[in-house]
Image (tube, grey):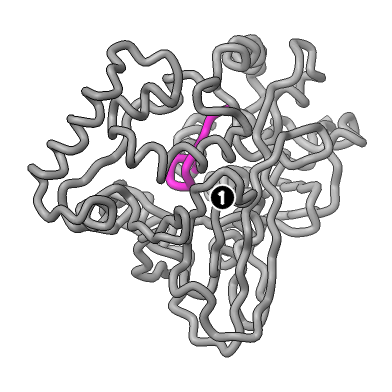
Amino acid sequence: MNKPYDYLIVGSGLFGAVFAHEAKKRGKRCLVIDKRNHSGGNIQCEIVEGINVHKYGAHIFHTNDKLIWDYVNSFVEFNRYTNSPLAVFENEMYNLPFNMNTFYQLWKVRTPNEVKAIIQAQIDESGTKDPQNLEEQAISLVGTDIYYKLIKGYTEKQWGRDANDLPAFIIKRLPVRFTYDNNYFNDKYQGIPIGGYNKLTEGLLNGIDVKLNVDYFANRTEWDAQAENIVFTGKIDEFYGYRFGQLQYRSLRFEHTTLDIDNYQGNAVVNYTERHIPYTRIIEHKHFEFGTQPKTVITKEYPEEWNIEKEPYYPINDVYNTEIYKKYEALAKADNHIVFGGRLAEYKYYDMHQVIGSALKKCQLI
């Protein structure tokens, strides 16, 4: 008996939405289901006081791929926002990424050669020749001042571990610029959708059947019967019943506050790099779209240990978890009627443009 849909897409985030859109263009019938009460996954925005609030953390689109840039702009025009975050350490402010502005703030030096000499002297003084942990690796790359003021506390909060207990491979390189350039990303294209990310999701899912507040695992047999193929964007270990054990993640908690002022911090992203401050950064959402609203909304972002009751955000791609994932990946490759896509299903960190690229590539195979 023919099933009503060609594809059941579990999850309406960016991967699921792009796959559904492209499959529909190829004449495929798609049903998208999501356990949340909204579509869009983690890029979903909520309008508060006329401001598009990034509910699940800041999402800044950036890519060098003109095809992907043109693709997203075909659904909604993107603005010219440039990510130029600041960092606070002991009430002093520093520009990010590490650039000549940062180095002047640290050492009051103005030339690249002066900066290189200071960094190299600190590296030599540390005596680190064969880094065995993240702390030694970072110091071997950028010296002690940058490490202790701008890396150590932030990283330890993110991972919930002391830096000398984290493996060196987490930091393969650290971007150091010897120019006065505060643009965080090197990508050619960068911006925020004018009117928020919901417009992008709505454009992708236009004309596609979407059901919200649906727990796929509560009625798995019933939902599987709806389609010939499944596109799964959730946790791959959950899909396979945790048969090889649970993969580990880091979670986040967001504290949103509306303030009766028009401008709280003057910048969209400000990092707090001291470990005793429990949040890693404060987002002021209106600055993503150059807002002039009379009020403002800020979000404090708190990294947390993950458990089964919390949202998984960042895969922990250490040796232990990688070995477990390889077992699930082998099962996935043997399932010809299932497509796994996105950060959770592929257990890897993806930026938004990479998610879109992956979805477009996998849709070409159908």
Quarter of the figure with the N terminus: top right
Is 354 magenta? The answer is yes
Seen at 54% across and 32% down, the residue is 366
Q: Quadrant of residue 254?
A: bottom right
Counting from the top left corner in percent of width and height, residue 101 is at 23, 58
Quarter assignment of residue 162: top right
| Residue displayed at 29% across by 50% down | 187
Residue 265: x percent and y percent? 49, 72
Residue 6 visible? The answer is no
| 365 magenta-colored | no
Residue type at mark 1 is Thr
| Crowding near the residue tagged with mark 1, few <14, some 14–19, many ≥20 C-alpha atoms within 10 Å | many
On the image, the x and y values in percent for residue 37 come to 80, 57
Query: Which residue was labeled with disc 1?
Result: 280
In front of the other: 78 or 167: 167
Name the residue at the bottom extreme: 294
Is residue 131 rendered to the left or right of residue 178?
Answer: right
Q: Which residues are magenta?
A: 347-355
Q: Secondary structure at mark 1?
A: loop
Residue 266 coordinates in the image, percent (x, y): 44, 74
Q: Nearer the viewer, residue 171 or 334?
A: 171
Can you see residue 163? yes
**Residue at 49% across / 86% down in the picture?**
292
